[in-house]
Amino acid sequence: RYVDNLASPTAARSQKSAQQQSAQLFSRSSGLHSLSNRGTHSVILKTQRDMEAGYQVQKMLRTNIQDVLKLARPASKSRASLAMSIGKHIAADLELRLVPQLQHQPQPRRSARLASQSLKSFQLAKHSISKSDRAIHKAIGKSRAKLQNDEAYAQHTHRLDYWFNGLKTWIMHDYWTNGGDRPERQMYRPMQAFHLFVAQFIRYHLGDTAQGKTPSGVVGPPRLILPYEHADVKSFGTDDMTRSDIGLAVSKMDADAALVEGRPYNNEQFAVIEAKASASKAAAESAAGAALSTADEQDEKLDANTVQAFKQLFLYTRQVYAKQCDRRFMWGITACDTRVRVCVLTSGGALASHEMDTSTEKGRREYIQLLVDWSMCDWRQLGFDPSVRWLKDLDCWEIDVPRLAVGTDDAGQQPTALSTTYYFDSVYIAASHLFGRHTRCFPASSKRPTPKDPVGPEVLIKDTWSFVRRKNGGDDNTGEHGEIAFLARIRRMLDQKPEYRNNLRTLVAGGPVRLDVDGASVDDTTDLFLGELSKQLRPAGDDPSDYSYYSHNRMAMTPIGKRLRDIPSIPELILVMHDAVRAHKAVFDNCGILHRDISENNILFQHDSDGNIHGVLIDFDNAADSTAAKRDYRPICTGTLPFMSVNNLRKADIPRTPVDDMESFLYLLIWLGVWGVTIKHRKRTRNESRRISYWNAGVDEAIESKVLRMQSDKSLLGLLAEIYSSNHTASDEESKWYIDLGNLVRQLRNAIFDNPNLDVNSAARGTWISSANSLFALASGGLDIIDDDAEDNMDDPDAFKARTDPVVANRIHQDALAVFKRYADETRARIKRSTTVSG
């Protein structure tokens, strides 16, 4: 996690090599790209991410939270006291240096006020330095005379003078607001110098901790927060063309207080600074529109420049978070001219501090104290996970997984903080979103590797943040350990029904991640590091008696399996999908668990010892107890956008049933058929546009397209006309299989939306809903698939609501499985005939 900021060329080359090796760990990960991005070339993808970031700023960000700065304050009282003394010393030294500078500056209104304030506080600053000096010297065990009479002190003051001369452009006068248009890049060097000015003080006073001489009052080694040398560049590991302004890294105390060489690596950045100068306002207003209010019209209005700064900060931080497997939450900074805000980004949302104006003494003091606190706080307060550790000598990671208690009950309770250590050197799934569950997966081994015996994966470790909602003291059955409890149920089912062992994962170990806090083992939750501030993340309008948070869980499971995107052929896809639907029904019927997140990432495949392929249904993190699901009128969408059911997308106030999941299976088959089942085929459709591109364009667009396309067999044909083999060259055998896949889709649609086994007058037929008139009007302008009799059916009952009837839902569930079984049986027979003929 530390960046070795050493000056020698040899050390620099070694550092670069280490950075590249660490970055390679993610070369085989999914990163931020997935099959769900099909039909969205890089420009469109960037536009979608920009829109998403804009939405997140408006809905997920709370601003003007003053206690955000306290989150970085060292937990130890003695350590916090020392940090406060160092912060006061640095701030007072800076103010004394500014006084002679201010006396020779032009006196615009704002500068005159600043000069007056600084001059009046001159004696106070000197007194503050003297007082803080005594506290520092007492804590670190050095006398003032010793500190100021050695060669190191002369070098120290020389470097301070150098960095001060670099930083003063940023903070001394109205350079940014009254000096005309200034390019943003003029902020970079002065801001870097400001951070290095602070780092030089910390390095000088606490540098002895590098040799293991921990001063009294310091718990664990302090560190330096250093900026990277290159600003406004694309960081290593970024999967699009975004360019972050300034990256900050964590360096050991024995490093130089100097710029970190080169451009940032996403897998090692501590935080990102997004800067906006006055010249950026016109562009920001064009991009962000008028001033916005965050957090559903809370008190503070953000100007367009600030909105744009937060939007870009979210975009860049997302890239960094995806490349760090030991990160629990992120820090970020926005700087609009001299107005600085610090932001903490968690699973449940983002909290930003009040503005710290560095053109004022108060703003400078607050920002300096934050940098000192970051240098001295506990490791976990920086957002890193101490239960995940990089082993440099072995070029792999070490991770602790809680042991599964014998007889784990449905609450997933664990007896103690006992854990098993695993090792991994690759990432299966990276955290691809800034907010939410932050799911990561690593193929791992419990055997410690050696240089001659690398990691041989035996389990898949899943690390995730689960949403927990409690209403009036009760639990909605997601719980801190919801998925673990569900997998425990499934494990007991597998003991009774071993025929499903190849189709569901077995839980080997798992539980809440526990951290050592003041000598006690504590569950890692958003409450742990946010404290009372976690209440600020509650959605506006929620009942104050409701209480929700995110719980950090980790589990080890078998088998590992391969991702659906790597399936080698269409017949194998059909067999795998049948197994997944079969497992889905078994889990629902025998365990009372509804999956609720059928997607490309949640179905795997594996081969047994005889070479037979099996589908594996995974990821029960969004699952719900079937009884609770009947009462669950969820206010948010659950799942992966292109595969969500219409009920899910429209946030319908009706229960979720297995029919919603069958609908997701249908959309997944169509998605694969259009974009291509195999890797070879998908390469040819990477930047193409299709009708189903609407499914990934936004919630409203997905609803309109799905309602209209699923209305009848005739309307579905418009999608099937775009199946891969209809638009690209494929072998005769592949074309036949694509035709079979299309026929499977048609029969599955009929089973879900026009089930022949239901009463011919059943209200459960079709796709029109109560708001269909507005959908019809919107769609008629851009979609060309309205049935001749569609308008006559606009006043029909809500078919989606009718399908929630338990009898109807169960029949559709059974018939959908029967469709898959029929095609799976025909596929096996066809493969057998082909093998016989070739033999």
Image (spheres, rainbow, N blue to C red):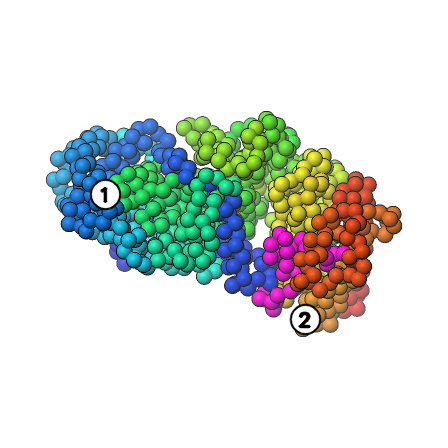
Does the magenta-highlighted stretch encompass residue 689?
yes
Residue occupying image coordinates x 38% and y 43%: 342
Residue type for callout 1? Leu
The image shows residue 364 at horizontal and vertical percentages of 28, 42
Spatial CA span between label 2 and label 1: 68 Å
Q: Is residue 448 left or right of residue 334?
A: right
Is residue 275 in sight in this rendering?
yes
Is residue 446 in sight in this rendering?
no
Which quadrant holds residue 207? Answer: top left
Q: Main secondary structure of the magenta part?
A: helix
The tag on residue 114 is 1
SS under mark 1: helix
The 10 Å Cα crowd at callout 1, few under 14, some 14 to 19, many 20 or more, is some
Q: Where are the magenta residues, as a range? A: 684-712
Residue occupying image coordinates x 30% and y 52%: 177
The image shows residue 768 at horizontal and vertical percentages of 75, 52
> How many circles with numbers are drawn on the protein?
2
Q: Is residue 20 left or right of residue 141?
A: right
Residue type for callout 2? Asn
* Image quarter in which the C terminus is found: bottom right
Q: Which residue is mark 2?
A: 727
